[in-house]
């Protein structure tokens, strides 16, 4: 059985934290495009230099670039039987590339971590990352509604979407996530 999963959720929903925990829990790599881009910025690579101003403004790095980065990462042996994608796909073009080229055998599960607006803005301002200015936050939330939220309909129609409440402390949310994932994957297996 493969465990190819995507975690969706608005910025500040606690997605990164929970994705890292799920990666440990299930023994699958956590593939965060935001982390990969920040590492490239830090290392001063060509990609990093290109991405920095886009990220600081809260805009999206071009699909072609992102598709290339993720294709390379998913070709690594540790991702052969499962992975947890965090931050990708973020647009319709990325979702199509994932379905048609990167994971033609299918994505097993898409998790949507749900947290209300007011809380995500508060959490983002508190973490103080370089791109966490009010303006960039607003831009990212707008882009999320416009580009990423519609992807949920696509996966919902294919019975692959599980929504999980992101309220509460980290242990509580993790327990809710693993229960939802196990129930869904168990049902698919016919157990
Ligand atoms: P957040 O969830 O707060 O937006 P991320 O770490 O997921 O943080 O992403 C940070 C930034 O990296 C984004 O605002 C965007 O500029 C860029 N980025 C990350 N993933 C993608 C992607 N799949 N497509 C385009 N840009 C991306």
Image (cartoon, rainbow, N blue to C red):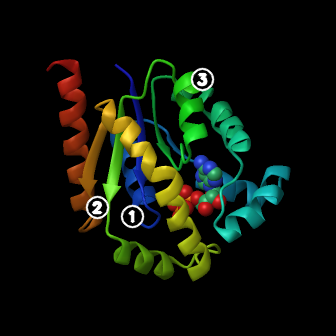
The span from disc 3 to disc 2 (Cα, nearest Å) is: 31 Å
- Find out whether the residues at labels 1 and 2 contact each other: C-beta distance under 8 Å: yes
Picture quarter containing residue 133? bottom right
Q: Earlier in the sequence, mark 3 or mark 2?
A: 3
Q: Earlier in the sequence, mark 3 or mark 1?
A: 1
Q: CA distance from mark 1 to mark 2?
A: 7 Å
| x then y, percent, for residue 118 | 36, 78
In the image, farthest residue toward the right: 46
Which numbered disc, 1 or 2, marks the residue that appears first in the sequence? 1
Point out the quarter of the image occupied by ligand 1: bottom right
Q: Quadrant of residue 50?
A: bottom right
- Left or right of residue 60: residue 152: left
The answer to which of 27 and 111 lies nearer the viewer is 111
Q: Residue at x 58, y 26 (%)?
A: 102
> Can residue 24 be seen here?
no
Q: Quadrant of the C terminus?
A: top left
Residue 158 coordinates in the image, percent (x, y) = 33, 29
The x, y position of residue 163, in whole percent, is 27, 49
| Label 1 sits on residue | 13
Residue at 63% from the left image edge and 26% from the top image edge? 75
* Displayed quadrant of residue 128: bottom right
Q: Is residue 137 above or below residue 134?
A: above
Q: Position of residue 61 (x, y in %)?
A: 70, 53
Camera-nearest label, 3 or 1: 3
Seen from the viewer's position, the closer of residues 147 and 162 is: 147
Q: Secondary structure at mark 2?
A: loop
CA distance for labels 3 and 1: 29 Å
Q: Which residue is mark 3?
A: 101
Closer to the camera in the image, 98 or 171: 98
**Which label is found at residue 166?**
2
């Amino acid at each position: 059985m493969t465990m190819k999963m995507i975690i969706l959720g608005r910025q500040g929903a606690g997605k990164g934290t929970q994705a890292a925990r799920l990666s440990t829990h299930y023994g699958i790599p956590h593939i965060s495009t935001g982390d990969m881009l920040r590492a490239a910025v830090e290392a001063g690579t060509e990609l990093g230099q290109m991405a920095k101003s886009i990220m600081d403004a809260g805009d999206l790095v071009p699909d072609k670039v992102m598709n290339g980065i993720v294709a390379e990462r998913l070709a690594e042996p540790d991702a052969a039987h499962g992975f947890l994608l965090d931050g990708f796909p973020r647009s319709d073009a990325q979702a199509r590339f994932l379905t048609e080229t990167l994971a033609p055998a299918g994505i097993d599960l898409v998790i949507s971590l749900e947290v209300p607006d007011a809380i995500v803005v508060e959490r983002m301002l508190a973490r103080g990352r370089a791109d966490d200015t009010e303006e960039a936050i607003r831009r990212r939330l707008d882009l999320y509604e416009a580009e990423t939220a519609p992807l949920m309909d696509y996966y919902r129609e294919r019975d692959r979407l599980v929504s999980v409440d992101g309220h509460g402390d980290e242990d509580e949310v993790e327990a809710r996530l693993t229960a939802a994932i196990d129930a869904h994957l168990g049902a698919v297996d016919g157990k």
